[in-house]
Amino acid sequence: MKLTNFLINKNTSCVPVWFMRQAGRYLPEFREIRSRNTDFIKLCLNSDLSSEITLQPINRFNLDAAIIFSDILMVPYALGQDVNFIKDKGPILSNFNLNIFLNNEINQYIAKLKPTYDAIKKTRKILNKDKSLISFVGAPWTLIIYMLKLKKEKNILDHDILQNKKNEISLMLEKINIFLCEHIKNQIKAGADVVQIFDSWAGLLPKHLLSDYCYKPNKKIVDFCNINNIPVICFPKGIKKNYSEFLNIVKPDCLNIDYDVDPEWARENLNNVCIQGGMNPNILLLEEKVIFQEAEKFLKIFKDYPYIFNLGHGLLPETNPNKLEKLINFVKEYN
């Protein structure tokens, strides 16, 4: 079943399967392309290769959805910041310039992202009509983490910069929302049928800032999606039991839970919403018996509940594709 129908109808008769980062480093065919394309941003902007990479896991596995090969940092790139991916260090952005940021024009921004929309069009033409094509954006707070370099090493929030940049952050939150909604609109127009909002660093926020920096910005994007009949999945990673408050305020069609959330707690406390994910990606590095046991735990807990099988974060580069295929088949047969 296509995710669009599943999310709208909150279906309980089947369990769709897809994985975050399913198009990526654990696949030898991806590594082969990546070895010839060392500039990650340029790779994302190559619509032919982006489409090919998107389809690699679909060609291998019995998945219910493809997710376009891109990156949440394509938005800061399109807004004028240099983005470089350094091996073993992750993404490094050039120093943020508020004037450049505030003077961005929608047309120029969309023109920079056109290869992403072209990749979606190409993928949709090839992809089986029964499979969804997922587009995505990073939530405003998560993008600001990178844009203002708010993170210290070991994933600790730099509270000094956060305090000093308070006014700047307020301006950025408003402006980024406009550009993110425009990006979503163009991805859907190109042929995507679901959007996922990744708030990957929501868990760094202290409780008193969750409302202004996480809930409200996510709600604005979800409201935009609702007005435009776009099914939307939210992933506010790391906010623990605040998932319940997030749901009550933001009201997405689906919530992806992370691996620190107890699935039984989620089943009891997150109502009138589809649940996605939850399993720790590290489990996939263990022996098959343990993988199946953990998968069955989630399938039992969410029996007769609208549940999408996924993980509590993206697939790890060390994941064995053969184990992943067996897991997918296990979930399909369990259905």
Image (cartoon, rainbow, N blue to C red):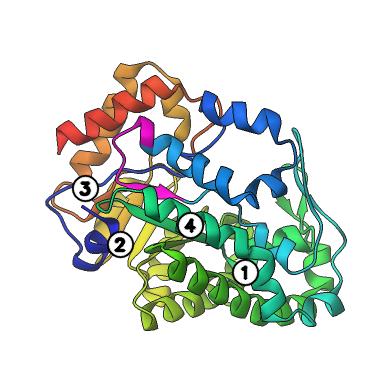
Neighbours of disc 2 within 10 Å: few (<14), some (14-19), many (20+): many
In this picture, residue 11 sits left or right of residue 152: left
Q: Residue at x 39, y 55 (%)?
A: 124
Q: In terms of sequence position, does the residue under pointer 3 or pointer 1 come before the other?
A: 1
Q: CA distance from mark 2 to mark 3?
A: 12 Å
Residue that appears at 57% across and 43% down: 49
> Which residue is denoted by mark 2 in the rendering?
270
Q: Secondary structure at mark 4?
A: helix
Name the mark nearer the viewer: 4 or 2. 4
Q: Against 190, is 127 above or below?
A: above
- Marks 2/3 in contact by CB < 8 Å: the verdict is no
The residue singled out by tag 4 in the image is 120
Pinpoint residue 311: horizontal percent, then vertical percent.
Answer: 41, 41
- Compared with 138, 15 (above or below) is above
Locate residue 187, reporting x and y percent: 49, 66
Magenta span includes 223: no
User: In what element is the residue under mark 3?
Assistant: loop
Q: Callout 3: 10 Å neighbours few (<14), some, many (20+)?
A: many
Could you give the CA–CA distance between mark 4 and mark 3, rounded to whole angstroms? Answer: 32 Å
Task: Tell which of 206 and 39 is nearer to you.
Answer: 39
Q: Amino acid at mark 3?
A: Phe
Residue 140 numbered mark, or none: 1
**Mark linked to residue 302:** 3
Mark 1 vs mark 4: in front: 4
The amino acid at mark 2 is Leu
Q: Determine if residue 34 is in view.
A: yes
Q: Compute the Cα span from label 4 to label 2.
A: 32 Å
Q: Residue at x 44, y 68 (%)?
A: 188
Q: Three-letter amino acid code at disc 4? A: Ile
Range of magenta residues: 59-67
Classify 200 as above or below 321: below
Does residue 142 appear left or right of residue 332 in this picture?
right
